[in-house]
């Protein structure tokens, strides 16, 4: 069974006004040891999970990290919010973490970097080797937009409703290497492509490759990168379960040499991601098989049916089924935040975002059915354990993970 891990990014807000504030340094000073780190902007803190065999273990880890973060920032008069964007923020040039890498990025990319006031959630899944990771990207890519729709949590930007469920996606796609990864024969071909991008001078290193999915530079994992940060930890767990099943299925097909040859047409993937960012769970998505517009519920139910063998093999079927039913019933975070804003203004949306991040409004937790009481691996026996072993040495820029 492939193990999983996740990174979550959190906005730091003034607890009274709900405004985004550059207080990451003060927050991190109260969070010593591995598990939390800085990001491009001083208003963001990133949390790195341990490595887990089960979704229940991942959930316990994420929930524990959120509690630690909440306790730390509350003592500073702050609140943490896991969402693609926050409703109340101001853009300022150069308000970044004071490191040479980040200074270079703001000088080079200017307003794109200045407006990188966004947060994402990333998931890593074990793969046998780097060649498998690269080849699996092509197989999982059509199914990533529905995962984006599940995560959509950023309808507001600079005090206005954008009309999108994930405005973070629109901001993110302005980076030169964001979007679909394309297909490559093996790791050598993929690495040559990245080296060519670096030689072009458009990016400075491989850490600035911001594809929707990519192989880790330091571990044998495939990394999901398309998703908004999620107010509810349960949503991250749902996405992790579905992504693990996608990777599991892809690895099996590759091992059996059943994977079809890629037709080379990836334009529709960017269009499908736009559709998911626009609609969330409340409108149509592009069906990954037919490439036609279908209701989000139909696209996700089709995905669930396709992945059932892989979900059962991982022991995740019951948990994913329950979490997906709940997500479709209650709607996307973007939908729930809009309803809060309609009733009580943007401050009500901020309060809901913070409450969900704390776990106060999740409406449930991830539970393990009795027949699946499989013990965690030794490396993930307790929430947050052994995190330091999985931290990558290289800072990778905005929204990029440091765990695993």
Image (spheres, helix red, strand yellow):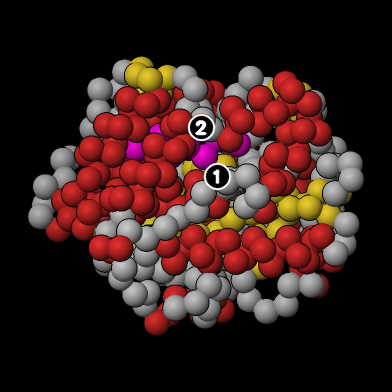
Mark 2 burial class by Cα count in 10 Å: few <14, some 14-19, many 20+: few
Please give the name of the residue rendered at 39% of the width and 82% of the height, measured from the top-left corner: 378
Asked if residue 311 shows in the view, the reply is yes
- Say the numbered circle drawn on residue 330: 2
For the residue pair 145 and 335, the one nearer the viewer reads as 335
Please give the name of the residue rendered at 32% of the width and 25% of the height, measured from the top-left corner: 298
Q: Element type at marker 1?
A: loop
- Range of magenta residues: 142-153
Please give the name of the residue rendered at 23% of the width and 37% of the height, measured from the top-left corner: 305
Residue 142 location (% of width, % of height):
33, 36
Q: Element type at marker 2?
A: helix
- Tell me whether circle 1 and circle 2 mark residues in contact (CB < 8 Å): yes
Residue 17 location (% of width, % of height):
89, 41
Question: Could you tell me how far apart the alpha carbons at marks 1 and 2 are, in whole angstroms?
Answer: 10 Å
Can you name the residue that lies furthest to the front here?
370
Task: Decide whether residue 326 is among the magenta residues.
Answer: no
- Mark 1 = which residue? 363
Counting residues from the N terminus, which is met first, the one under dot 1 or under dot 2?
A: 2
Using residue 4 as the reference point, say whether residue 305 is left or right of it.
Answer: left
Vertical order, 59 against 322 (above or below): below
Using residue 113 as the reference point, say whether residue 310 is left or right of it.
Answer: left
Mark 1 burial class by Cα count in 10 Å: few <14, some 14-19, many 20+: few
Vertical order, 137 against 1 (above or below): above
Q: Which is more foreground, mark 1 or mark 2?
A: 1
The N terminus, quarter of image = bottom left
Please give the name of the residue rendered at 41% of the width and 44% of the height, measured from the top-left corner: 323
């Amino acid at each position: 069974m492939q193990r999983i891990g996740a990174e979550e990014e959190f906005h730091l807000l003034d607890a009274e006004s709900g405004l985004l504030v550059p207080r990451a340094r003060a927050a991190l000073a109260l969070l010593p040891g591995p598990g939390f780190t800085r990001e491009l902007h001083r208003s963001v803190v990133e949390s790195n999970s341990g490595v887990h065999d089960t979704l229940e273990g991942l959930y316990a880890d994420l929930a524990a990290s959120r509690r630690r973060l909440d306790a730390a920032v509350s003592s500073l008069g702050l609140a943490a919010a896991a969402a693609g964007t926050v409703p109340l923020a101001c853009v300022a040039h150069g308000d970044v973490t004071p490191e040479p890498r980040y200074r270079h990025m703001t000088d080079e990319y200017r307003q794109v970097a200045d407006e990188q006031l966004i947060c994402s959630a990333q998931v890593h899944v074990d793969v046998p080797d780097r060649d498998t990771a690269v080849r699996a990207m092509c197989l999982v890519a059509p199914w990533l937009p529905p995962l984006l729709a599940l995560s959509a949590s950023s309808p507001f930007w600079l005090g206005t409703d954008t009309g999108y469920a994930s405005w973070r996606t629109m901001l993110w796609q302005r980076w030169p290497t964001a979007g679909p990864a394309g297909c490559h024969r093996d790791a050598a071909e993929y690495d040559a492509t990245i080296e060519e991008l670096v030689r072009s001078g458009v990016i400075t290193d491989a850490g600035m490759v911001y594809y929707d999915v990519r192989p880790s530079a330091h571990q044998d994992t495939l990394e999901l990168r398309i998703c908004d940060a999620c107010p509810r930890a349960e949503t991250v767990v749902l996405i992790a379960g579905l992504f693990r099943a996608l990777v599991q299925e892809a690895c099996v097909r590759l091992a059996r040499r059943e994977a079809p040859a890629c037709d080379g047409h990836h334009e529709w993937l960017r269009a499908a991601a736009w559709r998911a960012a626009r609609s969330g769970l409340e409108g149509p998505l592009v069906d990954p098989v037919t490439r036609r517009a279908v209701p989000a519920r139909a696209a996700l139910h089709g995905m669930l049916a396709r992945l059932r063998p892989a979900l059962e093999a991982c022991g995740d079927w019951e948990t994913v089924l329950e979490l997906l039913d709940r997500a479709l019933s209650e709607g996307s975070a973007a939908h729930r935040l809009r309803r809060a804003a309609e009733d009580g203004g943007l401050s009500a949306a901020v309060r809901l975002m913070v409450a969900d991040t704390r776990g106060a409004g999740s409406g449930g937790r991830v539970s393990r059915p009795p027949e699946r009481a499989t013990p965690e691996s030794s490396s993930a026996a307790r929430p947050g354990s052994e995190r330091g072993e999985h931290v990558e040495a290289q800072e990778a820029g905005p929204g990029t993970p440091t765990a695993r």
